Image (spheres, rainbow, N blue to C red):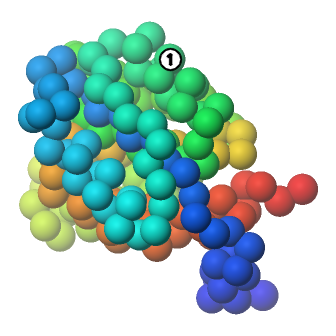
Amino acid sequence: MGVHDHKHEAETHVQQLTAGVITVSDTRTEATDESGRLLRELVEAAGHRVTHYRIVPDEMGAIRGAAVEFARAVDFVILSGGTGMTPRDVTIEACRPLFTKELEGFGELFRLLSFQEIGSAAVMSRAAAGAMGRMMLFCLPGSKAAVRLATERLILPEIKHLISHIRKA
C-alpha cells in the first residue's frame, strides 16, 4: 500500500482527535500567549478538540510533568517554546526521554521549511517529535510563525496517519 492509501485508510479509521497545548514560558500569561492561542485555533479549525491547555515555566520538571499528565488524556500534545539554544531552553531535554519512538524527520523537515522562510537562523531550532506510547508529542519553537509553519505544514496533514500507525497492534 502506498502513502496515499495509508493516509486515506487513516482518515476513515481515525476521526476527531483530542489535543493538549502546553506553552513553555517564564513570561507569558494566558492573555499574552499568542502562540498558544494560535495553536488551539489551528487544531480546532482542523476539526479536533483541544481539551487541555497550560502555561508552564522553562523548568524540566514542570514541562515533563505537564506532558505526562496530558498524555494520559489526549491523542496528541503540542508544546511551544523552550526549543532554542539558551540555557533556559530545556523542552527537548524534558521531552526526548518520553519518546518511545522519535520521529526524526519532523525536526529535519521543520528546519528545512523554516530555512526557506528565515534563512540560516533555522539551524538554531531544535524542534522535535515522537510517539509517547499511543499518543504523539510535538515540541515547537515559541514564535507564532514557527507554530503556524509546523502545525499547518507538518502536524495537521499527518496527525491522523501518525496516530493510526502508532495504535496498530
Badge 1: residue crowd in 10 Å (few <14, some 14–19, many ≥20): some
Seen in the picture, residue 129 relative to 48 is either above or below; the reply is above
The image quadrant that residue 150 belongs to is bottom left
**Furthest residue toward right:** 169
| Viewport quadrant of the C terminus | bottom right
Q: Position of residue 155 (x, y in %)?
A: 44, 62
* Residue located 38% across and 61% down the image: 44
- 80 vs 60, left or right, is left
Q: Position of residue 69 (x, y in %)?
A: 56, 24
Amino acid at circle 1: Gly
- 137 vs 8, left or right, is left
Seen in the picture, residue 45 relative to 143 is either above or below; the reply is below
Tell which of 92 and 68 is nearer to you.
68
- 44 vs 85, left or right, is right
The image quadrant that residue 30 belongs to is top left
What is the secondary structure assignment of the residue under circle 1? helix
Q: Position of residue 153 (x, y in %)?
A: 35, 70
* Residue located 12% across and 21% down the image: 27
* Residue 129 appears in view: no
* Residue located 26% across and 63% down the image: 149
* Residue 135 appears in view: yes
Q: Position of residue 10 (x, y in %)?
A: 69, 75
Judging by the rendered image, the residue that carries numbered circle 1 is: 65
* Residue located 32% across and 51% down the image: 40
Seen in the picture, residue 167 relative to 53 is either above or below; the reply is below
| Viewport quadrant of the N terminus | bottom right
How many numbered discs sit on the rendered protein?
Answer: 1
Tell which of 12 and 90 is nearer to you.
12
Seen in the picture, residue 71 relative to 114 is either above or below; the reply is above
